[in-house]
Amino acid sequence: MTKTVLITGATSGIGKSCAVKFASNENRLIITGRRQEKLLSLKNELTEQFNIEVLDLCFDVQDRIQVESTLSQLKSPWNKIDILINNAGLALGRDSFEDASMEDWETMMQTNVNGLLYVSKAVLPGMIVRKQGHVINIGSIAGKEVYENGNVYCASKFAVDAISKSMRIDLLKHNIKVTAIHPGAVETEFSIVRYKGDETKANATYNGFTPLAGDDIADAIFYAAQLPAHVCINELTITCTQQGSATNFYKNNK
């Protein structure tokens, strides 16, 4: 049966991999992001390759009014969202607490925490009415372990972990599944964004080991979304084989 899947932050990385994965399995997609050109490009790619329906919505999850107004105007069948993948998020900077940018902190909290809340609150009423749905929140291993110079990024992902657990409990009565996925090192635009375009620093992040790819996480998300109605994966922490914790790697530097 065709399902309607909403993916935030769909234009790159894990979000784009999820879009391709769910599209290849004949689902109907709502893709969101801030970059209109990339959204249109992805929409065209998915419709041409997989012959599916795709709705592109350009908005910033940080903007509550924009989120609410856009999602409240969805018409059938788009307003019957079966799976919500809260993927939009970012890290900015790797500075010690006393040196970090307040602007970076605010952007991370607004995107990683508030954005997830805004989109979830807009989508959940429809799931509650239908007594079914699945919310999949993309956290991070940084939401399980605090590391040096991680400060507010870690805090934002700890919040995602706590929100996911509380959502799961509160939504039990509505028969809605909640899954949190906590990836370790994934080679996407993540480090380029974190280091604000410094490719030398970004590339060094993955030197000496084979990191995860967005497709690896998308595969796990898809698996969790396909389980029988009575089965829910509450959370998964996923790393590459050479990663043992948030900061411990076995690197083959020669």
Image (cartoon, rainbow, N blue to C red):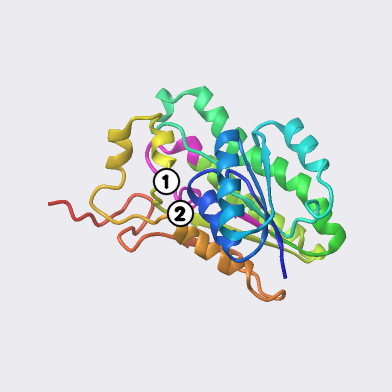
Residue 161, x across and y down, in percent: 58, 52
The magenta stretch spans which residues?
A: 135-153
Camera-side residue of 69 and 110: 69
Q: Kindly identify the residue that appears in the image at 63 percent across and 66 percent down.
A: 225
Against 232, residue 31 (above or below) is above
For disc 1, the neighbor class at 10 Å (few under 14, some 14 to 19, many from 20) is some
Q: Is residue 141 left or right of residue 20?
A: left
Which SS class for mark 2? helix
Which SS class for mark 1? loop
Tell me if residue 35 can be seen: no
In the picture, the disc for residue 188 is: 1
The N terminus: image quadrant = bottom right
Q: Are marks 2 and 1 in contact (CB under 8 Å)?
A: yes
Quadrant position of residue 119: top right
Tell me which amino acid carries mark 2.
Gly
In the picture, the disc for residue 214 is: 2
